[in-house]
Amino acid sequence: LGGFEINGQVFYPFIQVGGSEVGASSSTFTGGILQAICANHTLRDVLDACSFRVVHVGDAYTRFSTGFLNYVQQWTAAGTLAQRQAIQAAMEFHCASDEKGAAEFLQAQKFTKRVSLAAVQTVLEGDRSTGIISEDPTNLFNLVSAITANIRQLPNQDEKALLGAQAGRLMALASR
C-alpha cells in the first residue's frame, strides 16, 4: 500500500502486529494510518479499528495464518479514501475558540490536565517536526499531533500506547 499526501503531510497505511511468544496474550493485528514524521509515534486511527486477535489455544497457527491473510485482504480492499477524508476533516475542524477552550476540550475528552496543557503548549511552540500543520491550538489535527508527539518522553510503553490510541480516536470527532 502506498502513501498519500494531505496539505503537505505524508501518511502511510500500516498494520501493527502484537502478541506473546509464550501464550500470555492473544496475537493482535490492527490497521491504521501512520504520519511520516520522524518516529514520533503519530498513529492515526481514523476508521473503526480494523483488527482481529488469535488466542493461543488449539490450532492457533492455522487460525493465525488464515485470519491474517483475510485481514490483509480486507485492509487492502478498504483502501484509504475514508481515512483521507477523516484526516482532511480533522485538519479543518476547530474544537474551541481559543487555547484555554482547547485545553478544556481535551479534558472533556478524558485527557488529564497535564496532557491537555502540554498539547496546547506544543502546538503554540510551532515545531513542525511534531506533525502539526500550524500554530493553532484549536485545530483538532494539531492537538492530536501534539499529544502523540509528547508521548515520546513517557517511560511506560503501555501508557504511550493508551494515550496514542486515545488521541487517535479524537480524529473521529471531526467526521461527525
Image (cartoon, rainbow, N blue to C red):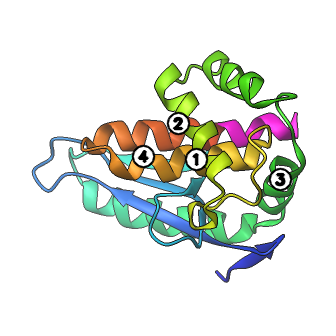
Name the image quarter holding the C terminus.
top right
Q: Which residue is mark 2?
A: 118
**Residue at mark 2 to residue at mark 4: CA–CA distance:** 10 Å
Give, as a three-letter code, the residue at label 1. Answer: Thr
**Residue at mark 2 to residue at mark 1: CA–CA distance:** 6 Å
Q: Is residue 102 magenta?
A: no
SS state under label 4: helix
Magenta span: helix, strand or loop, mainly? helix
**Which of the marked residues, 2 or 3, is nearer the chain's N terminus?**
3
Dot 3 surroundings within 10 Å: few (below 14), some, or many (20 or more)? many
> Which residue is at a point 86% across and 37% down the rendered structure image?
94
Left or right placement of residue 151 versus residue 102 in this view: left
Give, as a three-letter code, the residue at label 2. Answer: Ala
**Residue at mark 1 to residue at mark 4: CA–CA distance:** 12 Å
- The residue stretch that appears in magenta: 170-176
Q: Which residue is mark 1?
A: 122
SS state under label 1: helix
Disc 2 to disc 1: CB gap under 8 Å: yes
Say which of 5 and 116 sits in front.
Answer: 116
Mark seen at residue 151: 4
**Residue at mark 1 to residue at mark 3: CA–CA distance:** 17 Å
Q: Which residue is mark 3?
A: 91
Say which of 52 and 107 sits in front.
Answer: 107
The location of residue 79, given as percent across then percent down, is 75, 69
> Which residue is at a point 54% across and 62% down the rendered structure image?
71
Give, as a three-letter code, the residue at label 3. Answer: Met
Front tag of 2 and 3: 2
SS state under label 3: helix
- The residue most toward the front is 125
Dot 4 surroundings within 10 Å: few (below 14), some, or many (20 or more)? many
Disc 1 to disc 3: CB gap under 8 Å: no
Name the image quarter holding the N terminus.
bottom right
